[in-house]
Amino acid sequence: MGVGHVALALGASKAAPRMNVGWLVLAAMLSDFLLGIFAMTGLEHATVPPDYATKHYLLFTFPYSHGLLALLLWAVIAAYLISRAYGSDRNRVWIVVALVVLSHFVLDGLVHVAGLPLAAENSPKLGLGLWNHMPLELGIETVMAIAGVALYLKLSGFGAPALGRYGMVIFMALVTMMTWTQLLATAPPKPRQLTVAWIVVPLAFSAIAYALDRKRARQVAL
Ligand SMILES: [Zn+2]
């Protein structure tokens, strides 16, 4: 899943309004960032199915970044590290960050075909395979993106800096378009390109969201 993760992060900002939404985007995409790190070390990888040109999706071996058991650990670590900066709001931030990290398992579980393991690679897997109905899947992600932006705009209100509000709308429109490009993919990406993208995209998206939300989050924190 692509923009759906970012959309969930924007929606979750309602539950922790004092927090910069950039942290939530990072939490929502943490699994993909970790996949890049584990792919670099050779512990995880993607395989290209023979019918990639018509199906447009990859199959994954990724128990350490996307397995439920591992994600529980990553959720606790991320929640601990991020919540430390939020004093009196610490407990609320801890819970919100942990749930957003875990949401990756549920959202990817809806779309992946081979599925996400509950624990080790040979354990039972969650995979509803919405990627087999790619236009429907991308339509759902688009609806999520619209809902996420709407919730964010409602949270930030009309008094919030215009740059942040309009910037977030444009950013989400671009991420939605990027997600739709999956439908056009016929040539499989190279493993090295994938690894770089898995690492860079979550960092870049969270940095952009952080920059756009900076003034709003500061105003609320005062
Ligand atoms: Zn993922």
Image (cartoon, rainbow, N blue to C red):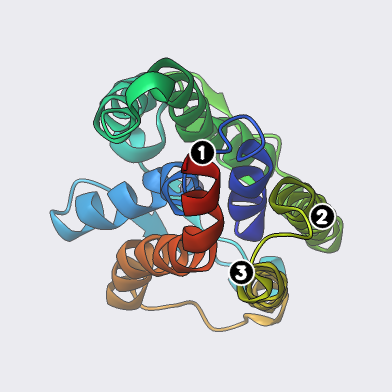
Mark identifier at residue 179: none
Q: Which residue is mark 1?
A: 18
Quarter residue 120 falls in: top left
In the depicted structure, whether residue 106 falls above or below residue 155: above
Q: Secondary structure at mark 3?
A: helix
Mark 3 in CB contact with mark 2 (< 8 angstroms): no
Is the shortest distance between ligand 1 and the CB of mark 2 under 8 Å? no
Is the shortest distance between ligand 1 and the CB of mark 3 under 8 Å? no
Q: Position of residue 210 (x, y in %)?
A: 44, 60
Q: Position of residue 145 (x, y in %)?
A: 75, 57
In the depicted structure, whether residue 151 falls above or below residue 105: below
The residue at 42%/47% (across/down) is: 23
User: Which-is-in-front pick, marks 3 and 2?
Assistant: 3
Q: Nearer the viewer, residue 125 or 194?
A: 194
Q: Secondary structure at mark 2?
A: helix
Q: Which residue is mark 2?
A: 133
User: In whole angstroms, how far apart are the C-alphas of marks 2 and 1?
Assistant: 38 Å
User: Which-is-in-front pick, marks 2 and 1?
Assistant: 1
Q: Residue type at mark 3?
A: Gly
Mark 3 in CB contact with mark 1 (< 8 angstroms): no
In the image: residue 43, left or right of residue 131 = left
The residue at 47%/49% (across/down) is: 20
User: In whole angstroms, how far apart are the C-alphas of marks 3 and 2?
Assistant: 34 Å
In the image: residue 194, left or right of residue 205 = left
Q: Residue type at mark 1?
A: Arg
- Residue 49: tell me if it is visible: no
Circle 3 Cα neighbour tier, 10 Å, few/some/many (<14 / 14–19 / ≥20): many
Q: Which residue is mark 3?
A: 164
